[in-house]
């Protein structure tokens, strides 16, 4: 039984009239609760793969199975709902919404799920406490350091207890020490919640924290 | 430049902003000039080379005077003219009939004389009664050919004119004129042996030569004095256009400012990088200004072309209104005025540079890293917010003081109005901030909370667009309330003034036709008629104004209709009966007259002083009207007949009186019996037609502001595309993204409308209390229709939501994947 299954995935970009393949018959599986690191050089298509696995982007061919559901056979609103309910995202550039406070950013997934603002806020405060940002819920993102912003992003990604966490270069914009702390926090929380995690990185140091490592080279999984 | 070329939407929005701003300024200016030109052209056509004119105040000159003067040795060049407005059967509007003496015309209106000489047999023109010459344009409009007949719609003296020739030389001086011989004009207009005026070309010394030979009741005036009276006829009409032109200028400038401000703010990262790689603040500043100059020139050029196109539509509308209200006119929309082009073009480039100046200085003077930060920019914008609002508030108060307290003319009134509008616009952004402060801690739904926050966080970008929308809406309220107030005042005034049951007049009374004395006698003696008021219509020139002078026998009921502004009513009427004057409010205002003052009027025996016995409210003429008791009037101006009668039914039996009048007047042609209600209805219809152009300009302003909001939202959506992509990744539906953008825009519209209502009411107050008062001497009560206010709020919100439709659709439909990859 796999939580995430990628089968014969193909994707190419057309830039300036030129056909540039990103993946060619890409296939792999990730089991429930497994933490997998996807290693690859810059431009190897790691972020594109995450977008395809979350239903944000569409493949040219092949399929992504999410807990037995073929993601790209769903209509766009259903894919959005699935993403809202069952996927958490951590981005390289944190991507906190600047117009919302840190607490509101973390509460956002819960509010999108229809929880009352007060209840969502209580959960958000608890999630921030878990990532070491207690009493920071009233501050705006720009007043936090990079590491603090990424912790807030982790709290936002996990606050609604998603089945899958997709992390795109979560330490790419942080110094080594801070990055190590962030990876430790991510894996600890994912393991504690039994969350399946795909961690996209180009850093061996980050990959060491995973249960399994996949190497993406020239559009294919080269080994694990 | 490469940035704007690569980001075409941003480049397009900046160019569109500038182009639209310039286009509106130019279009309104050209339409304004077209209306002015139409009136001036009408005056200039007949003026020719004449320097002076002989007239008889309150009447027509004797032809014998012309003959006598011509026989005198040393006589300066002079030409007799018989002219008036006439209606042609089956044609709308009025045309000017001009009777000229071809033998005397050459030094005065050589081209006009040549038209008749070239187009027709000169002999036929002089000898054949009813021979007419038209220019090709007018002939085409009237659909007539040589030999066709045109019926003059002039009761009792109906006459047909035969088209003898068509002038196809394209001579502007003959446009819209019906050129006939003096004798034909005298016959058509019922002025045998009389002349409207005699034109003169006088050199030094000629004036004294003439003075010795002129009868006392003939006045020598310069043609500029006469022309001034004529061009002032359009003053009320023109003032409306001027007010709208100023507002268009302001909204256009806001639009340009908004576009350029955006263009600089959006490139803060690029600018920061340039500073980081070693560009000095001065170099960066110059670079940005240079780029702004190129964009400004391109946008201005496009705006000038667009403005010319737009002005054609507006000018046609203005010409149609003048034709309906005053007389037939053909205004050439393509007559481009260099000064107007220069003004609009200069404003376009200046506003572009000015709009770039502030953000460019801000970006150039901050350290490289902070130049990149949006937060710093917004913080700086918030820091300036209170200062800008403070200045705005000061300007607003200064505007009120200038308009209401500082003495001066219309210019002072407009200056105050302008300061008020700029001040209100500068206060607008702080209202968004205030709304945010008010709502920030409220338990609003997620999307509303985000929307209100977004507005405050993007104040530097959205504030100007909201201010532009506010100005447009404010103009809607201001001008709307002014028009409503004026309409209400005119309606009340007319309803009170028209006390009679019916009015009897010649169908051509507007063109000077008078009632047959026999008709007056019979009607007055009818037992069905309880009381009669008689009106003799004349006019005098006072301080360059053509003032209406009415000799009236007023019944007690008619007297009740006068809204007297000062003095005891009984004393006023006692003074009137003793030969005193009742003068209208505009005349009293312009001449600084009060009750008891003496006013000298030109009479047949020279200037005679009359006591002002009362001042009454009057909107009939901005130049003023004077009422004088009929007996006193006839003592000084014997020529004028009775133009109209106001009749009161015996025992209130109006139907009975109408039947009796029908019987009495059988066989009398060209008489019109009108009820007060019908006159009121027709007058209000004329009023509404006058302000139709204003309505169109209000819509135009709103469209410009709408595009401003659209541009601001589009630019903002481009900037926030990454943010929307993140929200989509977190599970926000497309519809929710669209609702977020639509909601933000709705709040923008609401804020603009909420400021526009008080600002517009203040604007209306100044227009009524200062501008109208200074221009026309009119006072009126302030009338606010609740529907107008509601309409403005709904229009503001509707325009804002409409402006958000495309940006909302575009943002929600965009693929989030590429945006998520961006830094």
Image (cartoon, coloured by chain):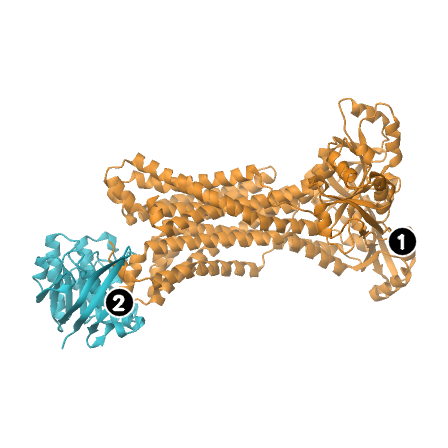
Tell me which chain the residue with mark 1 is part of.
B
Q: Quadrant of residue B77?
A: top right
Which disc, if any, is residue B463?
Answer: none
Q: Is residue B308 left or right of residue B453?
A: right
Chain appearing in orange on the rendered image: B
Which numbered disc, 1 or 2, marks the residue closer to the eye?
2
Residue B510, percent across and down? Answer: 78, 50
**Residue with the mark numbered 1:** B520
Residue A101 to residue A84: above or below:
above
Give me the C-alpha separation between circle 1 and circle 2: 93 Å
Residue B160 is at least partly visible in this image = yes
From the rendered image, report the letter of the chain displayed in cyan. Answer: A
Q: Position of residue B651 (x, y in %)?
A: 85, 64
Classify 10 Å Cα crowding around label 2: few (below 14), some (14-19), many (20 and above).
many
Residue B762 x %, y %: 54, 49
Q: Which residue is mark 2?
A: A58
Q: Quadrant of residue A17?
A: bottom left
Question: Between B463 and B174, which is closer to the camera in this rendering?
Answer: B174
């Amino acid at each position: 039984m796999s939580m995430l299954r990628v089968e014969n995935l193909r994707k190419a970009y057309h830039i300036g009239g030129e056909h540039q393949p990103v993946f060619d018959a890409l296939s792999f599986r990730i089991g429930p609760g497994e933490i997998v690191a996807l290693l690859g050089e810059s431009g190897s298509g790691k972020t594109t793969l995450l977008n395809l696995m979350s239903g944000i982007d569409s493949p040219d061919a092949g399929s992504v199975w999410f807990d037995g559901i073929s993601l790209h056979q769903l209509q766009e609103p259903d894919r959005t709902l699935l993403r809202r309910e069952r996927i958490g995202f951590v981005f390289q550039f944190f991507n906190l919404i600047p117009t919302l406070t840190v607490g509101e950013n973390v509460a956002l997934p819960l509010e999108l799920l229809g929880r009352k603002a007060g209840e969502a806020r209580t959960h958000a405060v608890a999630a921030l406490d878990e990532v070491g940002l207690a009493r920071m819920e009233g501050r705006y993102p720009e007043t936090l350091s990079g590491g603090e912003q990424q912790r807030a992003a982790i709290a936002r990604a996990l606050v609604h207890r998603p089945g899958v966490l997709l992390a795109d270069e979560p330490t790419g914009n942080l110094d080594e020490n801070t990055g190590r702390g962030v990876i430790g926090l991510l894996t600890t929380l994912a393991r504690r919640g039994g969350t399946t995690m795909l961690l996209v990185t180009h850093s061996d140091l980050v990959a060491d924290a995973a249960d399994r490592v996949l190497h993406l080279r020239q559009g294919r999984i080269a080994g694990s | 430049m490469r940035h704007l070329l690569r980001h075409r939407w941003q480049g397009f929005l900046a160019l569109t902003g500038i182009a639209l701003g310039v286009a509106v300024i130019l279009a309104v200016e050209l339409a304004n000039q077209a209306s002015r030109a139409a009136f001036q052209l009408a005056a200039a056509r007949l003026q020719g080379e004449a320097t002076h004119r002989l007239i008889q105040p309150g009447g027509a000159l004797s032809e014998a005077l012309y003959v006598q003067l011509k026989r005198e040795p040393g006589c300066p060049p002079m030409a007799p003219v018989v002219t008036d407005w006439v209606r042609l059967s089956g044609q709308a509007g009025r045309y000017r009939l001009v009777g000229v003496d071809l033998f005397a015309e050459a030094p005065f209106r050589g081209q006009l004389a040549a038209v008749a000489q070239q187009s027709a047999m000169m002999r036929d023109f002089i000898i054949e009664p009813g021979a007419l010459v038209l220019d090709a344009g007018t002939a085409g409009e009237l659909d007539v050919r040589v030999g066709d007949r045109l019926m003059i719609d002039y009761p009792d003296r109906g006459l047909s004119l035969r088209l003898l020739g068509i002038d196809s030389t394209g001579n502007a001086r003959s446009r819209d004129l019906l050129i006939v011989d003096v004798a034909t004009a005298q016959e058509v207009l019922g002025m045998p042996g009389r002349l409207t005026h005699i034109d003169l070309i006088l050199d030094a010394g000629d004036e004294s030569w003439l003075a010795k030979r002129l009868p006392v009741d003939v006045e020598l005036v310069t043609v500029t004095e006469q022309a001034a009276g004529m061009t002032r006829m359009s003053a009320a009409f023109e003032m409306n256009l001027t007010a709208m032109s100023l507002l268009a200028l302001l909204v256009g400038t806001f639009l340009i400012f908004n576009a350029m401000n955006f263009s600089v703010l959006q490139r803060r990262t690029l600018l920061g990088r340039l500073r980081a790689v070693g560009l000095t603040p001065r170099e960066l500043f110059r670079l940005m200004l240079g780029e702004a100059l190129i964009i400004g020139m391109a946008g201005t050029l496009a705006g000038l072309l667009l403005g010319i196109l737009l002005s054609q539509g507006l000018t046609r509308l203005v010409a149609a209104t003048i034709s309906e209200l005053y007389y037939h006119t053909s205004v050439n929309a393509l007559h481009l005025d260099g000064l107007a082009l220069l003004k609009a073009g200069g404003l376009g480039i200046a506003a572009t540079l000015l709009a770039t100046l502030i953000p460019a200085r801000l970006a150039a003077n901050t350290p490289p890293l902070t130049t990149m930060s949006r937060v710093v920019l917004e913080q700086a914008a918030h820091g300036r917010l209170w200062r800008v609002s403070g200045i705005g508030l000061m300007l607003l108060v200064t505007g009120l003081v200038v308009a209401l307290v500082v003495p001066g003319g219309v210019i002072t009134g407009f200056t105050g109005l302008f300061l008020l509008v700029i001040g209100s616009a500068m206060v607008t952004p702080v209202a968004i901030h205030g709304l945010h402060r008010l709502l920030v801690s409220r338990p609003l739904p997620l999307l509303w909370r985000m929307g209100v926050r977004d507005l405050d966080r993007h104040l530097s970008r959205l504030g100007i667009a909201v201010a532009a929308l506010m100005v447009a809406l404010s103009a809607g309220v201001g001008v709307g309330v002014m028009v409503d107030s004026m309409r209400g005042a005119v309606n009340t005034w007319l309803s009170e003034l028209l006390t009679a049951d019916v009015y009897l007049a010649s169908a051509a009374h507007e063109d000077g036709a008078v009632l047959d004395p026999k008709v007056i006698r019979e009607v007055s003696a009818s037992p069905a008629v309880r009381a009669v008021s008689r009106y003799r219509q004349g006019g005098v020139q006072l301080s360059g104004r053509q003032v209406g002078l009415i000799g009236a026998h007023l019944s007690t009921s008619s007297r009740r209709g006068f809204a007297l502004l000062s003095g005891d009513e009984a004393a006023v009427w006692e003074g009137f009966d003793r030969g005193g004057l009742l003068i209208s409010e505009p005349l009293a205002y312009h001449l600084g007259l009060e009750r008891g003052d003496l006013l000298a009027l030109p009479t047949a025996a020279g200037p005679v002083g009359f006591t002002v016995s009362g001042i009454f409210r009057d909107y009939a003429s901005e130049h003023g009207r004077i009422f004088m008791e009929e007996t006193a009037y006839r003592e000084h101006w014997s020529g004028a007949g009775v133009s109209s009668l106001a009749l009161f039914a015996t025992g209130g039996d109006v139907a009975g009186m109408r039947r009796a009048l029908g019987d009495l007047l059988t066989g009398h042609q060209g008489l019109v019996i009108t009820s007060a209600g019908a006159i009121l209805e027709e007058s209000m219809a004329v009023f509404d037609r006058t302000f139709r152009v204003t309505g169109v300009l209000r819509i135009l302003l709103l469209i410009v502001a709408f595009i401003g909001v659209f541009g601001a939202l589009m630019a903002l959506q481009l900037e926030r595309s990454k943010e929307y992509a993140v929200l989509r990744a977190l599970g926000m539906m497309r519809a929710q993204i669209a609702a977020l953008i639509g909601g933000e825009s709705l709040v923008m519209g609401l804020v603009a409308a909420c400021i526009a209502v008080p600002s517009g009411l203040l604007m209306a107050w100044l227009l009524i209390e200062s501008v109208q008062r200074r221009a026309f001497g009119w006072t009126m009560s302030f009338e606010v229709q609740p529907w107008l206010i509601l309409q403005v709020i709904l229009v503001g919100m509707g325009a804002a939501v409409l402006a958000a439709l495309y940006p909302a659709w575009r943002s929600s439909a965009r693929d989030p994947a590429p945006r998520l990859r961006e830094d």
